[in-house]
Amino acid sequence: MVGLTDTAFLQNLGLIIVTAALFSLAGRRVRVPSIVAFLLGGLVLGPITGLVSESEALNLLTESGIVLLLFLVGLELTVERIREVGKVAILAGSAQILITSLMGWGISFGLGFSALQSALLAASLTISSTVVVVTLLVERNESSTSHGQTVIGILLVQDIFVILLLTVLTGLGGGREADATAITAGLLRAFGGMLALMVLMLVSARYLLPRPFSWAGKSRETIFIWSLSWCFIVVTAGHFLHLSHEIGAFLAGVSLAQLPHSHDLQRRVRPLMNFFVAIFFVTLGIGMALDVPSALWGKALVLSLFVLVGKFLILLFIAARLKFDARRAFLSALLLTQISEFSFILAAVAKKSGLPVGDTGTLLGLVGTITITFSALLIGAREPIFAFLTKRGLLRAFPPSPEAKESDAVPLSGHIIVIGMNTLGRELVRRLAARGEIVAAADTDPVKLRDLPCIKVLGDAESPAVLREAGLGTARLLVSTLHIESTNDLLAYRCRVAGVPAAIHAVNLREVTHLLDMEVAYMMSPKVDGIQLQNAELLRRGMIRK
Amino acid sequence: MTGLALLLLSSAVAFALAQRFRLPPIPLLILLGFAMSRCGIEMDRAALNQVIDVGLAFLVFAAGIELNPSRFTGQTRAILWIGIVQFVVTAVLGYFLARAIGFDDAASLYLGVGLSTSSTLVAVRQLYRFPGSLRTYGRLVLGVLLVQDVVMIVFIVLLPRFAGGYGDLASGFAALAIMAVTATVCQRYLPRLMAKHGPPDEETMLLCTLGILFLFSGFSHWMNISFIAGGFAAGFALSGFPVSGEARGVISSLNTFFVALFFSALGAQVEHPDMDTFLKSLAFAAIVLIATPIVVTIFAEWKGHLSSRNAITAGLLLAQTSEFSIILAVYGERLGQISGETVSLIALVAVISMTLTPFLATDAVARRLLHLHPLRRLMKTDSQLSDHVVVLGYGSAGRWIIRPLVASGLRIVVIDQDPSVIAQLRKEGHTCIRGDASDKKVLLRAGADKARFILVSLHQVAEVVKVIEHVCSSVPVFARVFEEVSAAKVEASGGIPILNSIAAADRFMEWFERAMAAKKEATAGNEPAASP
């Protein structure tokens, strides 16, 4: 009887999620990056067992994943940061595109492809995968490091290149001979659109968004839905201007990055993004074709080798010219050694335009699977590789890396975390700070955090990310003044796991079992303390006897 | 993508309106989704259905995570009484009204059951506007909401089987039982697993949480019952402490996202109600708005031992239909058991009753209704009282208040709402009044105007101010409050504020200094350092 409902979509989604969970758990055991685990899971679901096939419905989910990923990246970028890395990224990105595509064309032509097919392959080999790289960066909290931002900048330059390519390819199609005017018009439109959207975003970041968003910030739900809605509206607007979803989402993120809530928003968007991105990679695996002729395997291996080694060397060369330090150069180059899921789209569009592409589509699929898997594995093992290269003196051409300048944040240590800025929380922050302690205060309301002498963390204390930002691992003590019993119990538990003593507000004096179980160091009971203060006051006024 | 952007846009507007006018977002989400579809914005029905499916799964899942029975120990009996009686009474009234209006048997059943659960999302939101409510009637309300949810899940599984006879029903029950047992085993086992291995990182936790959701949904599908039951059971499986906290943390933003989309998409799909449907919905909403508060008030006083005013507030908080009613309706329509018209009727009743909740479930309304209460209990006390001390609000730490008073030879009168507190104090020979401390009549009965001084500890500062006004500043009123803002209000109205928070801060700092000194000593003597 339930058969009346169309449950195919939910079933597929369920299978994908369960597979993703199982493979990522197993992958963690053997230290395989989750991307590879997801891809393998997808291969099992798709080509191997045929349980799930690609469908329109899943497309929306995977596209949303890419959008949220880039939105998140944008959210982390402030205007100063863009100025800092913008120039380098454009230089490095353009040089990389030029060199890689020339060499890629040569190799493909050498492998026996026609000039046109070689051009298509070369373009595809040039582009690295934004989703893979950014997922790897975000997973390791490296998206705001210098190499992280360089790489993201290069990826965005590549993205613009893809849009131009797609414009050209679509212009080539329709059976006409290369219509120069149509292509030029298309290119102009793409550039114009990008410029228009960029200006629009900068103007709104400055004048349009701050006031309404600070009003919406009173409720965490409202501001969360508002920013997601802003993201998808900008993406849609970009779509009408013939821009990719990635660029729209990225710009939407940048325009919100200047708000005081951007940190909290990042934390809230992240789980949503994780969910969609897991689906994205599993679906990618599902779409892979494994039954290909052996001749193609050989070619795929050659091209993959070029991407994994050749592209790495090209990027190192460019980095040396731009005077990157050794670490930044090595990590930036290593991160970009794969081809993008875009390549498949590129091949599909070319085919649709009526170009004689042959089996390049299948070939690119193979190269994609191989390079994405291997680059993820290599990035997982980057520390030993880096140590090896440095020891052998292979990175001598680069200036040495400045020590511990990877992140801007000063690592917190030996500090005290105070959660909940009610009267008690604010009072404790003031007194502890006056005593010379370093205090990190957390609350969901920016107004309550205002003018306190401490490090401020905006966000929900239930979220592990907030506690991480407050430096729970290295804290000396955590104090919760919250009136919410369940959150206090959870905080006590988190402190116990982290081995940090906790002083927790015992909201309900009759129900402190959890706090006792978690062996909190101190239980605050303002009710009892208040009564004693009252008794002292009554005594002082002579209203009661001692 | 455009469709998704539009749904999000309408949700964003709904949340803005909800925040501006302090309304619950659900009815606004439905209304705006509906308005959007009326404006001629066509959306892919298949895509809308997918959004609704995923939203449904998350909605029931989040409800299940809150279902930890250990949170309600001591009140379980009262909660079961109120929940079940309320459910039955409203369902029966709704059924007969529907039959009388001319609905067929199946539609009447859906309408009746659809009326009888209250909305957790709406009630909890309103509950947080009453500071301190969680320590009195709040738990009871939360418990009742969960009982209603469970009953609703049972109905969602069984309703489609009524046509199939007893065999079908029995197999449905069996499937439910298997599901419940599996979930209970997980609920017990998962916290132990987490204690052994430590909490996983967020990405793994997210995937495992969702994996469990979909495993249970798949399991329920395989047993041929609704995936909604599976989603709820999955939530229950994760409800043990501290698993629930971790799970809630990782899915909260997914939940906000999909639930917002769910209601917008639902609104976009609802048929345009005609005048007739609108009038009918008013009649059904009237049942919820009248019957529920009455039934809940009676049983909350009788079985839950709440004071009249708290019982009335609890009743008002529960007087709306639920997101689960809408789930039931959507499900019924998909099964072809009810028409689109019935679905819009149920949705309309939900929109009306949910929108009214923030206006009805307020202190002012509860006070006004208190005058209609036939059994307003006022105990007799000695009217010759004078020069005594009145203690308003005894609570869990009251012993600390009265001990020095009694030791000083003062006569005390305690006013509190909790019958068990009153009974205990009477046993010890103290004069007590059970009732609402901010009620002038109660205060006069306690001789507050002739007292030597008054000690107040109430949850809402407005009540404290009322007390001070009632005794007309002739008697010193000491009021213990937590926030500085409240202290300012007490002071402005002529009372003497005692700040619990500052007292606690003093105590904390004393402890902190002691601990630091101890640590210093310990490190000097090369002993292991004590906390912090």
Image (spheres, helix red, strand yellow):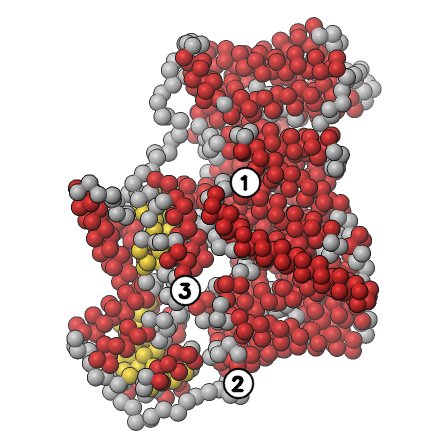
**Residue at 77 percent of width and 17 percent of height:** A293
Quadrant position of the N terminus of chain B in the picture: top right
Chain name for mark 3:
A
Q: Is residue A95 above or below residue B76?
A: above
**Do we see residue B43 in this rendering?**
no
Asked if residue B160 can be seen in this view, the reply is: yes
Give the residue type that dot 2 points to.
His
**Residue under numbered circle 2:** B373
**Proximity of marks 1 and 2: CB atoms separated by less than 8 Å:** no
User: Element at badge 3?
Assistant: loop
Q: Is residue B206 above or below residue A530?
A: above
Residue at point 53%, 30% (across, down): A31
- The numbered disc on residue B204 is 1
Residue drawn 72% across the image and 45% down it: A11
Give the vertical position of A412 relative to B436 (above or below).
Answer: above
Cα separation between marks 3 and 2? 33 Å
Crowding at mark 3 (Cα within 10 Å: few <14, some 14-19, many 20+): few
**Residue A278 place in picture, x, y as percent:** 61, 36
Q: Is residue A27 above or below residue B206?
A: above
